[in-house]
Amino acid sequence: MGAAGALVVYRFQMDENSSPLRWLGDRLEMLDQRLLPRRIDWISFTDAASVASAITTMVVRGAPAIGVAAAYGLALEARLAVMRGTPVRDALVPAAEILRRSRPTAVNLAWAVDRMMRAFDGLESLEPAAIAERLAAEACAIHAEDIEGNKRMGAFGAGLLPASSTVLTHCNAGALATGGYGTALGVIRAARDAGKTIAVFADETRPYLQGSRLTAWELQRDGIDVTVITDSMAGHFFSKGTFDAVIVGADRIAANGDAANKIGTYAVAVLANAHGVPFYVAAPLSTIDPDCATGAAIPIEERSANEVVETRGIGPDGKAASVVTAPDGVRVRHPAFDVTPARLITAIVTERGVLRPPYDAAIAALFQEKR
Amino acid sequence: MGAAGALVVYRFQMDENSSPLRWLGDRLEMLDQRLLPRRIDWISFTDAASVASAITTMVVRGAPAIGVAAAYGLALEARLAVMRGTPVRDALVPAAEILRRSRPTAVNLAWAVDRMMRAFDGLESLEPAAIAERLAAEACAIHAEDIEGNKRMGAFGAGLLPASSTVLTHCNAGALATGGYGTALGVIRAARDAGKTIAVFADETRPYLQGSRLTAWELQRDGIDVTVITDSMAGHFFSKGTFDAVIVGADRIAANGDAANKIGTYAVAVLANAHGVPFYVAAPLSTIDPDCATGAAIPIEERSANEVVETRGIGPDGKAASVVTAPDGVRVRHPAFDVTPARLITAIVTERGVLRPPYDAAIAALFQEKR
C-alpha cells in the first residue's frame, strides 16, 4: 500500500443531482441507477472488471456516462498496477478489452477507451505512479469535457424549442446518462434557463423504465414540469397535437446521420414524421462513429428476456422488488436499441453546433475541422 | 328463497381455455384476469353492481366480454328481484344504468344492456320468474352468439393471412376478451386450423400488460407460436420486415370506420402504414356504433395514474405482488384507448364478412341489410 501513497489524488465530484459518477482519487463511485427513483445508493469501484460488469448490468447506463465510467475504469487499473508493482501496460490492455466489450451499441465506450489508451501511449516513458496520475487526470478531463460539451450543446439546442412548448423525450438522456447536465435533457435545461416554459412528456421506456424511473426523477428534482406516459401513449398525444418537438439522445450516430438510440426511439421518430413534429437528436461528437457508414453497420445489443418479463421496482415495504408479468417459458425478444434513419431526424445538436441534413456532409465537415 | 326454486337454471359453461365467463344458473363466474397468467381464480357474482365493479376494475375486460358480462349482470338482477318479490323493472332500470357506466369506451356494453332491456320490454306481461328465466336465456344467447360470430369472423379473416406469416397483435383480442374464441386471435386460430403456419408477436401492452399476461398465455396454451415484445419494440421489427400483417380487436368502431382500441393501437397502425404492412381490425357488429359519425365522437376513458406507475405481477414467492416504478407525486396521463383513423385500416373483419374502404358505405350497407 506504500506505492498508493505516492499517487496524487485527483478528485472529481459533483453533487448527486448532477452526475452519476464521482472520482474520489482511490476509487470511483457510481450511483446505482437500477434502484432509482426510490433508493440513492452509491457503489464503490476499484478495478476495471467491476466497472465493466456495472456497465453490463446497467448500474450505470447512457452512452456518454458509460464512456466516462470506462475511462475511470482504466485509471483504476493503472493505479492497481502501481500498487502491485506490475507493468501498467499488462494491466491496461486486457482491461481495455473487457471495458470495450461490456456493451456493444454505444460507441462512446470505445471512444473513451481509445482516448485513454492513446494518452497511455504518450506516457509510457514515465514512472508508473506518474502514468497512473496522468491517466486519472485524463479520465477526469473526459468527465469534465463531457459536462462542458453538454452545456454548449444545451446553448445551441435551446434555440430550437419554442418559447412555450411541450417536448416528448424517450429514455433518459439527462445528467444520469452523461458526465452531468445531460444531452437531450441538457437542451431542455438550457431552454428553461433561457426563460422558456418547457413541459416534458417522458415515455416510461420499457423494459428498463429509464423514462419513469430516471427522467421523471431527474426533472422533478430540477423543478421541470414532467408527465410520465407509457411508450404506447405517445401516438395518442401526437394525434392530439400535444407535442411541439421531440428530443432524444443517441448511442451511436453513423456517418450518414442514422442514429441508434434506446429501443422505441424509431417508433417515436415515425410518429413525429407522420404528424409534422420536429425530431431532434442531441449527442456529443464522441457518439458519432465515422467508421459506420450507415445505421445498418451499428451493432444492436440483444439483452436478456428476463428484463422484459420481470419488472423491477419498489415493493409495498419500500424495498427493491420485482414481479413477473408473462407466462413461464414464453419466447421473448429484447433488442435494446433501434436505428432511426437520418431522413426522420430534423437536426442533430452537438457541442459544436446544430447539424442539418444532409448529415453526411455536415458530419464529414465537422470531423475534418476537428483534425 | 322459495321463489328461487321456481327458476329454471340455464347453464352456459365452456372450459377455462375457451371463455372467461361461466353462467351457472344461479351465479356468474368470471376468470380473474388481473391474476393471469400465474393464477387461475374464478370469482362468483350474484348481482349487477358487483359485475359492474368487476368490469370497472378489469377482473373482466375486452369489449365483447364485458358486453356478455353485463347481460349476465341483468339476468342476475332479475333473479334477485324474483327472490326478493320486488318488481323486476325496479331492479333492472338502475342496474342497467350502473352497468352502462362501468366503462365508457367499449360500445358492446351499451349494446348488450340495450338488447337485454328490449328483451325485457317484450316480457313484462309474464310472471316474474318467467321473466328472469327468459332474461337468463337471452344472456346465454348473447354469449353463444358472440362465440359463433367469432368463429364466422375467423373463417372470413383467415383468408387475409398468408399461408406462412408472422402477425403482430396488440392487447388481447382473444378468447379472454370475448365470450370465447376471440376476434383478432380468432382469426389467427382459424388460419392455423385452416393449415396455415402463423407466428404471433404480442406487444406486451402497457400499462395493463394484456399482451404478455393474457395473449401470450392464451396462445401458448393453444399451441400457437408466440413471442412477447415491449410495445416500444414493434417499430424495430417493422423496420426489419418481420411482420406480414397486423391484426387487432376494437372497442368501438364509428360509422366511418375509425376504430377505438387499446392505447398503443394507433401507433402500431401508423407504423404498419409507414412500412406497407396490412392493418386489420377484427370485431363483431356489436362493436360498431352507427351513432358515432367519426372517431372524434368516441369517449376515451382516462384511467388512474396508479395503473401506470405500479406494475402488478407475481413476486418471487409466487404470490400476486406489485412494484412502483416512478417517483412519488409525478404527473401521469393514462388514456386507456386511442382512435385509429379509417384511412390506416386495410380491412375490418366482421362476422358478416370482410369490410373494405370506404367504410362509411360498407357499414351503412351492413346495418341496412341487418334491419
Image: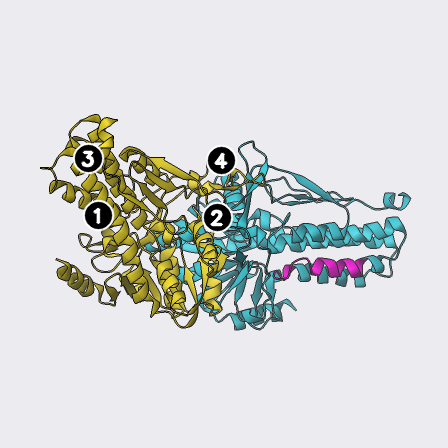
Chain colours: A yellow, B cyan
Q: Is residue B157 visible?
A: yes
Q: Is residue A59 visible?
A: no
Q: Are marks 3 and 4 in contact (CB under 8 Å)?
A: no
Chain of residue at mark 3:
A
| Disc 4 packing (10 Å; few <14; some 14–19; many ≥20) | few
Say whether residue B168 is left or right of residue B30. Answer: left
Q: Are marks 3 and 1 in contact (CB under 8 Å)?
A: no
Say whether residue B261 is left or right of residue A176. Answer: right
**Does mark 2 fall on the same chain as mark 1?**
no
Q: Nearer the viewer, residue A148 or A73?
A: A148
Q: Which residue is mark 1?
A: A111
Q: Which residue is mark 3?
A: A92
Could you tell me residue B321's position as x and y percent? 58, 39
Residue occupying the point 30% across, 50% down = A64
**Does mark 1 fall on the same chain as mark 3?**
yes
Determine which quarter of the picture holds residue A203.
bottom left
* Span shown in magenta: B92-108
**Does mark 2 fall on the same chain as mark 3?**
no
Q: Which residue is mark 2?
A: B204
Amino acid type indicated by mark 3:
Leu
Instruction: Give the quadrant of the C terminus of chain A.
Output: bottom left
Instruction: Give the quadrant of the N terminus of chain A.
Output: top left
Q: Are marks 2 and 4 in contact (CB under 8 Å)?
A: no
Could you tell me residue A193's position as x and y percent? 39, 66
- State which mark lies toward you, 3 or 4: 3
Amino acid type indicated by mark 4:
Asp
- State which mark lies toward you, 3 or 2: 3
Q: Nearer the viewer, residue A172 or A80?
A: A80
> How far apart are the two marked residues, 1 and 4, measured between alpha carbons?
40 Å
